[in-house]
Structures are given as C-alpha cells and as structure tokens.
Image: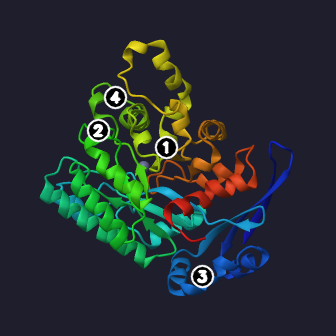
Amino acid sequence: MTSREVLERDPIGTVASITFTGCDLLAATASRARTPARPAARGKARAKPVAARRDVTATGRRREVVVGGRRVKVIDVHAHCVIPEAQALLGLKTDVTRGPGIDQVGPRRIGEMDAQGIDMEAISINPAWYRAERDVATQVIKIQNERLAQFCATYPDRFVAFASVALQFPDLAVQQLVEGVKKLGLRGAAVGASVAGDEFSDPKFHPFWAKAEELGVLIFIHPQSTPDLARRLKGNGWLANTIGNPLDTTIALSHLIFEGTLDRFPGLKICSAHGGGYLPSYAPRSDNSLRVAPDMDTGVKLKKKPTEYLRTMYYDTLVFTSEALRHLAAEVGTSQLVVGTDHPIPWQDKSVDHILKAPGFSNAERRAMLGETAARLLGVKL
Ligand SMILES: [Zn+2]
C-alpha cells in the first residue's frame, strides 16, 4: 500500500488535509479501518460481496480516494462504450483505436478505473443513429439500452448508464427514456449536441425535455463535432474534435439559453461534457451581445441573464489544468461540477488528481466534485 499526505490551503486559510491512498486487496481492510466515515460503504460492500470480490481479483489494485479523512466515492459521468451488435445495424464497425476496450465493460476497464481512483462510471454511447430510419433506430436503441442495463447489473458497484434515445423521433425518444429509466434502471439519457442538423431548442424536442424534467433525470450532452464546418476543420490538429467538439457544445447550450428552452423547463438537469465547451470560458459576452446589437433580438424574453443559466447546469471537469478548473468553477459554481474522464479515450487519466491538486477548493467542494454531486444526480447511494 502506498499513501501520501498533501496539505493545501483553501482561500480562507484553513489547512485542508488530503490523503491519496492506493490499496491492494490485502491492504483494503486496513485502509477502511483507518478511515472513520465508512460505515455505509462497508455495509454496501457486504451487501454485494460477489461483485466486489470479482472487481478486485480482476485488477489486484484499487486506489481509494480520501479527502479530509473521508472516503469519497468517485463517480465519472463521462465514459464511453459501444455495442458492436448495434453498430453493425448502422453499418458501422467498432473503432477501438481511440480507446481499447471501448466495446468491453469488464475487468480491463475496471482495472483502469481502479488505478485512477474511479469508483463508478456512468457509461454512455455517443449517438450515431440520428439519421437512421425509425425501425432501425428502434432496434439499435433497444439493443443498447438492454445491454447497458445488463452491464450495470453485472457490476452494480461500478457502473450506472445513460439511456440511448432516438431523438430524431421525439415521441419515440420519450418512450425510450421512460422505459430506460423505469424498466431498465438507467439514470438518464446521453444525447449529442444537435440532432441531424436540428437544434435542441427546436420546439419539436419540447416533449423530450418535459419528460426528462418530469422524471428528474440527468441528460448528458456530448458533442459530435460541428459537421457544418467540416471543410474548415480539415488538416493537422484533429480540429474537428479539438475545437469542433467544444464548439458544438457551446452552440447547443447557447441555443437552449437564448431560445428560452431553459426558462420553459427550469427543472431540467443538463450536464455537458468537456467543461461545457467554450461557453464558460467566454460567458460574459453572452450577457452583452443583445445590448450591442438590439436589432438582432428576435423577441425571446429571457427570465435571467444568459450567464445565470450557466449556474443551473452541470459540467464535467475535463478541462486539463488547475487554472481552467478554477475559471470554470468561478463561472458556474463548484456545485455544478462532476468528474469526467472520457474513458477509455485517453484524454485524461488523472481526473482525480486534477481535482485534488487544484488550489483554492475546500474539502467539501472537492468531495462534491469528485462524487457527491454526481451521486445525487444519478441516484447513486453513497
Ligand atoms: Zn467523450
């Protein structure tokens, strides 16, 4: 077992003690014994001994994250998988080059989670079916949601999942969301940042947002580049992803704000990948645009300033540096941030340290970002 203490000073001068603990199987019991606030977790471990034993046996080593003397269940809301059988229906092959194991949710993935200190992943599938016909999309979603539920049932301590939905048919997407949540135990839905060229703010999607709001489940927005800009994004730098993805999210969230969708569905819980793209980086511009160009106002009367809506949504912390995390938190609030790794796509394998080492956060804020907020949003018991 290895452990180290890091002392950091929060803004009001209180010394915060953070322990990083890497524990192998034999040391795990001792580690729990040293950590006072673990009765619930120990009870949970006893409740599901088979899954817990299998996880540890498969990997041999599991990092346990402790903040201020309290074990934190770290929950990653941004983790991918694909179901090859469903992809085949869409004429797609499984691309494993960007993430070995993307078609597997099992020991390999759990081993990587253990090494990173990720206790749970909320897995999702990036939409590749928004242009599929209704019968194909129906079949794809059925396979995916049932398989996701199966994965989660096999490893109940390690995975929850977002349902896939065929948003190009909003009535169908509503049914799939209800079935995914109520029958299959999925924790919300994962969507792109637009649907076959249509913005989420389009009124045809209102029934879907209304149902998500009614169910109280999280909608995870994951961008899919900006296809309209494909020609300009060619060349070195993988710009279709590097800047195309955060731009896609920025456009989606801006329409949800400026078209009044978030006013219409104030209880909607939206979480965006990649720290919300570029929007939080340059948020105040949104507050000033219609002042500068009132002739561009189409007449939508917003109830709040555009930047105020940013504080009602959630974002993952996949922004790489302490300064970027500080700025994101300043714009949206630490209460709106949750861990996102992009696993198994290797954008970031130090998501836990990213939060633990960033200066200026209290222990309570770190615990919230690492897992408590995600647990509440996803219905995960701590
Ligand atoms: Zn991703």
Q: Position of residue 56 (x, y in %)?
A: 56, 78
- Neighbour tally class for label 3: few under 14, some 14-19, many 20 plus, Cα within 10 Å: some
| Quarter occupied by the C terminus | bottom right
- Neighbour tally class for label 4: few under 14, some 14-19, many 20 plus, Cα within 10 Å: some
Sequence-first disc among 2 and 3: 3
User: Residue, x 29% and y 45% (percent of image)?
Assistant: 205
Q: Position of residue 317 (x, y in %)?
A: 56, 47
In the picture of the structure, the residue carrying the numbered disc 2 is 202
Amino acid type, residue under disc 4 in the picture: Leu
Q: Is residue 15 visible?
A: yes
Sequence-first disc among 3 and 1: 3
Q: CA distance from mark 1 to mark 2?
A: 23 Å
Amino acid type, residue under disc 1 in the picture: His
Sequence-first disc among 1 and 2: 2
Q: Secondary structure at mark 1?
A: helix
Q: Quadrant of residue 284?
A: top right
**Callout 2 touching callout 3 (CB < 8 Å):** no
In the picture of the structure, the residue carrying the numbered disc 3 is 45
Q: CA distance from mark 3 to mark 1?
A: 32 Å
**Callout 3 touching callout 4 (CB < 8 Å):** no
In the picture of the structure, the residue carrying the numbered disc 4 is 233
